[in-house]
Image (cartoon, rainbow, N blue to C red):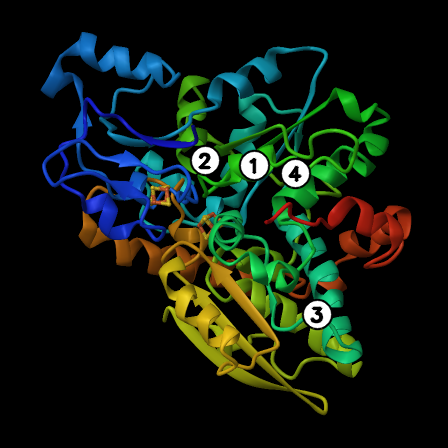
């Protein structure tokens, strides 16, 4: 179970069913709802929306503590617990940190650094990478790495794959594959598009595979001793790391995923004073990242990052403007034609999974002709993910998404390197380990074929 609805708490308001992009929530109005697991893509949007809860005030201490225990939520938590909820893996993380045989490496997704501070009373969309790194160190992880680094690797691999498909011929349109809920939706409903998916793994999985191989070499450790934890804005990332395909390093790429919300609970459980934390850096070399890596957190960001690199790979010239504003925005489906040398690159961005169905139907019936399509399940990409801090007031949603999006773009502008292929850390990992994008070893570790159909 990754996402579930507690039958004892659900009041049957069906607000969750309205936001479920997979029509997976079933039940009569006013009756407890259930999730059809054959349809659910584990995006957690129902978890974000649910308003039926248990608290000490409403149900008494015993009833509240019982729910907390069932869900393995740490003792320090005193806030209301909602009917729609996601699995909480904090106990596994704590056990790994306490185990002297395990070397724990943690990675944090781009969208976590623009949201986690909200759990400690900061303004919506506060950008806090330095405090985040400090908190992870205080919690006790051995290495503090960053998903933004493998996001840059994803661009090297996915960008090269796109250039190859466009210039040498290959299945088009190519779809991004870094949103596991989208991959699951395609698997459930449109398996005929399997070969259109980029074969590059998501940044989470690429990070895990690199940490247990190259990362193990850097530590002079056997990969079997590394316990890889990821902190994600996303409830579906735990499903992705459990996929049978995701173990090309010889070990499970990522051992466990927790959400932004879980991380805040873990920080509180470890009695770390967030406000008093001195900002620190992520560890080198696998925690160094570019602006391209960080914009993965917003809708259109993967596309923009890929274009920053793809343009220069195709033309051999610097891109005229590093900010590819043509692919930005929040509309559910938007397209642009970008001049890349002699090529008119036709791209599309989908955000909010319900919007992908007409796109797939149009590709199927030949009325939509694009080279590359980014698909993200959540309303505005990962900044609005199901594992982000819960917004109790619907009115706060748009404000929070806009603030987190703007903070992400500010972070991009502030970083010294903004294109993945220009990152010294990326050059180093290819020189010392991966050889070149699409090499045999890169293909073995960083690409996959989904067991669809
Ligand atoms: S996790 Fe997502 S797909 Fe599953 S029931 Fe909830 S909203 Fe629907
Ligand atoms: S958009 Fe991001 S947070 Fe939402 S399901 Fe996809 S990967 Fe997860």
Mark 3 sits on what residue?
Answer: 162
Q: Nearer the viewer, mark 2 or mark 4?
A: 2
Q: In the image, ligand 1 is in what quadrant?
A: top left
Left-right relation of 386 to 169 = left
- Tell me which residue sits at (34%, 53%) in the image: 21
The front one of 218 and 306 is 306
Tell me the crowding category of disc 1: few under 14, some 14 to 19, or many 20 or more residues within 10 angstroms, Cα based. many
Mark 4 sits on what residue?
Answer: 145
The front one of 363 and 436 is 363
> Sequence order check: which comes first, mark 4 or mark 3?
4
- Tell me which residue sits at (68%, 42%) in the image: 207
Tell me the crowding category of disc 3: few under 14, some 14 to 19, or many 20 or more residues within 10 angstroms, Cα based. many
- Where 150 falls versus 134 (above or below)? below
Q: Is mark 3 on a helix, strand or loop?
A: helix
Q: Nearer the viewer, mark 2 or mark 3?
A: 3
Mark 1 sits on what residue?
Answer: 133
- Tell me which residue sits at (57%, 68%) in the image: 303
Mark 2 sits on what residue?
Answer: 259
Q: Estimate the x, y position of residue 379 in percent, counting from the top left.
A: 36, 58
Residue reaching furthest to the top: 62
Tell me the crowding category of disc 4: few under 14, some 14 to 19, or many 20 or more residues within 10 angstroms, Cα based. many
């Amino acid at each position: 179970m990754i996402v579930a609805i507690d039958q004892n708490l659900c009041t049957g308001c069906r607000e969750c069913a309205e936001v479920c992009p997979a029509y997976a929530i079933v039940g009569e109005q006013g009756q407890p709802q259930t999730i059809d697991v054959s349809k659910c893509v584990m995006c957690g949007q129902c978890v974000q929306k649910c308003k039926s809860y248990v608290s000490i005030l409403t149900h008494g201490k015993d009833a509240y503590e019982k729910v907390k225990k069932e869900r393995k939520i740490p003792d320090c938590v005193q806030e209301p617990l909602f009917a729609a909820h996601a699995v909480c893996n904090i106990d596994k993380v704590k056990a790994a940190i306490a185990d002297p045989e395990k070397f724990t490496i943690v990675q944090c997704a781009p969208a976590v650094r623009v949201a986690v501070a909200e759990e400690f009373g900061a303004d919506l969309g506060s950008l806090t990478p330095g405090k985040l790194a400090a908190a992870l160190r205080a919690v006790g992880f051995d290495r503090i790495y960053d998903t933004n680094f493998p996001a840059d690797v994803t661009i090297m691999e996915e960008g090269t794959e796109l250039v190859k498909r466009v210039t040498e011929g290959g299945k088009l349109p190519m779809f991004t594959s870094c949103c596991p809920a989208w991959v699951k939706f395609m698997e459930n409903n449109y398996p005929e598009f399997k070969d259109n998916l980029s074969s590059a793994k998501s940044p989470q999985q690429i990070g895990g595979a690199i940490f247990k191989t190259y990362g193990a070499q850097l530590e002079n450790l056997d990969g079997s001793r590394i316990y890889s934890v990821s902190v994600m804005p996303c409830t579906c990332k735990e499903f992705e790391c459990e996929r049978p395909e995701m173990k090309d390093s010889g070990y499970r790429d990522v051992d466990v995923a927790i959400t932004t919300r879980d991380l805040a609970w873990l920080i509180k459980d470890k009695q770390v004073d967030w406000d008093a934390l001195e900002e620190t850096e992520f560890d080198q070399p696998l925690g160094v990242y570019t602006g391209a890596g960080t914009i993965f957190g917003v809708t259109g960001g993967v596309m923009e990052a890929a274009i920053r690199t793809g343009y220069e790979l195709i033309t051999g010239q610097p891109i005229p403007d590093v900010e590819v504003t043509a692919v930005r925005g929040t509309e559910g489906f938007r397209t642009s034609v970008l001049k890349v040398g002699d090529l008119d690159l036709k791209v599309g961005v989908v955000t909010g999974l319900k919007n992908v169905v007409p796109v797939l139907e149009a590709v199927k019936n030949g009325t939509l002709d694009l080279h590359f399509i980014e698909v993200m399940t959540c309303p505005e990409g990962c900044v609005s993910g199901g594992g982000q801090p819960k917004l109790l007031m619907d009115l706060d949603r748009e404000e929070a998404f806009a603030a987190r999006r703007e903070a992400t773009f500010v972070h991009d502008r502030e970083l010294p390197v903004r294109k993945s292929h220009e990152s010294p850390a990326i050059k180093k990992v290819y020189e010392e380990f991966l050889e070149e994008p699409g090499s045999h070893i890169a293909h073995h570790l960083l690409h996959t074929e989904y067991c669809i159909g």
